[in-house]
Image (tube, helix red, strand yellow):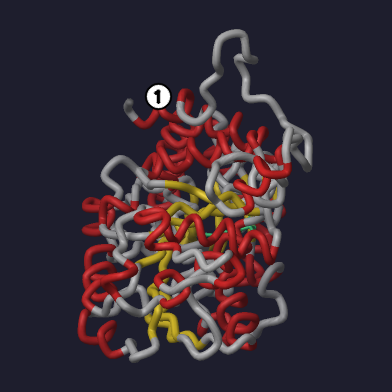
Amino acid sequence: MKIDTKCVQSGYKPKNGEPRVLPIIQSTTYKYDTSEAMGDLFDLKAEGFFYTRLANPTVDAVEKKIADLEGGLLAVMTSSGQAASMYSILNICKAGDHVVSSAAIYGGTFNLFNKTLRDLGIDFTFVPADIDEAGLEAAFRDNTKCVFGETISNPSLDVLDFELFAKVAHRHGVPLIVDNTFATPINCRPIEFGADIVTHSTTKYMDGHACAIGGVVVDSGNFDWAASGKYPMLTTPDESYHGITYTETFGKAAYGVKMRTHIMRDIGAMQSPQNAFLLNIGLETLALRMERHCANGLAVARYLESRMADGKITWVNYPGLESCKYADRVKKYLPGGSCGVVSFGVAGGREGAVRFMEGLKLAAIVTHVADARTCVLHPASTTHRQLSDKELEECGVSPDLIRFSTGIENIEDIIEDIANALEKV
Ligand SMILES: *Cc1c(COP(=O)(O)O)cnc(C)c1O
């Protein structure tokens, strides 16, 4: 099946006489006739549901759809994108381990890595998005356990050099984990470019309607944990699971199964059946929506670029513009489109940006990105307001930066809104 067909058809497969639409199984628990039958589930000898913290039929169907969309072996859905990022690391790292991460990542992920996971004893080295092979090589240590990056980073819109990151990670016997939230599997399937694990905040384009927080981790099944020799948690018996060795019992699915039976069991940040149901409805139209988000995003970027002539706009960044710093990577990894998010600067710095924002009528000022409604955020006066102009520059957010998340409304209305707001600048 083609990807747009998978959006609609993958996952839930009703049998004769069953509901056509994925049902919400709003039950924490499942009944069995004998304790022995349930015991087999606990021993991982049989597949089935016994407690919704670990697995639920509604969530399971959506996990299968997302695994199919990404071309992965299996997926584990989580309560949020933050939980997905944390799980992807905690599944294979413990105190004393080290991770190489692109610095061009979502601010929440940066805090999770740089503060919370560091406090737990996992060390991180952050490398710039435009790092070369020697630089990336130099970031590795003997205790490095994985490499992390974002396909298109939020909010700086840097595009990951998949080939380089995958090559160097694999040379060191560690997997590449990629957060594919902004591109979605419609525009990029990181596994095809060498990524081993893919994560998402499903809160963004996947849900697409800004109604359900969620996350997912997809295991490609491609990474050979046993051959690497660096992951005893996968290749030696787990005493908390009756001495099961994940790589021996589950083969290619070792990482994904361990995430569910160990990390999900112990931490419990699962996605609710209700949210999985909403997410599934969003996924049905993902391919259609991304087409419009990308067409509108490119049109907005081109319009803004045209307004550099009269000095109202000082710069524009959009992966898809010919002037984009990463135009070559966009051509290679995102040939069908990137996303609907555009960043730019308006004349007059911080004050100019504030005046522009106040002039918008259709585009709403919200702390969100990547949903059907056009929305806009000025980090310097909101999410990053405690920082001075100098500190802002250091974390790659200029005081005039506006993050414009182009929705799926008619492009003429969106551009008219921008044009009117620019009158105030
Ligand atoms: C929003 C976001 C996250 C965090 O996801 P939540 O669902 O808000 O927890 C992670 N990565 C990226 C790229 C994001 O945009």
Q: Please identify the quarter of the rendering in which residue 173 is found.
A: bottom left
Front-most of residues 365 and 345: 365
Q: Residue at x 63, y 52 (%)?
A: 42
| SS type, badge 1 | helix
Q: Position of residue 228 (x, y in %)?
A: 29, 74
Q: Residue at x 33, y 74 (%)?
A: 174
Q: Position of residue 172 (x, y in %)?
A: 26, 79
Front-most of residues 357 and 140: 140
Front-most of residues 354 and 270: 270
Q: Please identify the quarter of the rendering in which residue 5 is found.
A: top left
Total residue callouts: 1
Query: How many residues crowd mark 1 within 10 Å: few (<14), some (14–19), many (20+)?
Result: few
On whether ligand 1 comes within 8 Å of the CB at mark 1, the answer is no
Q: Position of residue 422 (x, y in %)?
A: 58, 51
Q: Is residue 422 visible?
A: no
Q: Which residue is mark 1?
A: 5
Badge 1 amino acid: Thr
Q: Position of residue 59 (x, y in %)?
A: 62, 40
In the picture shown, does residue 187 fall above or below 311?
Answer: above
Q: Residue at x 66, y 69 (%)?
A: 351
Give the position of the C terminus as an image quadrant.
bottom right
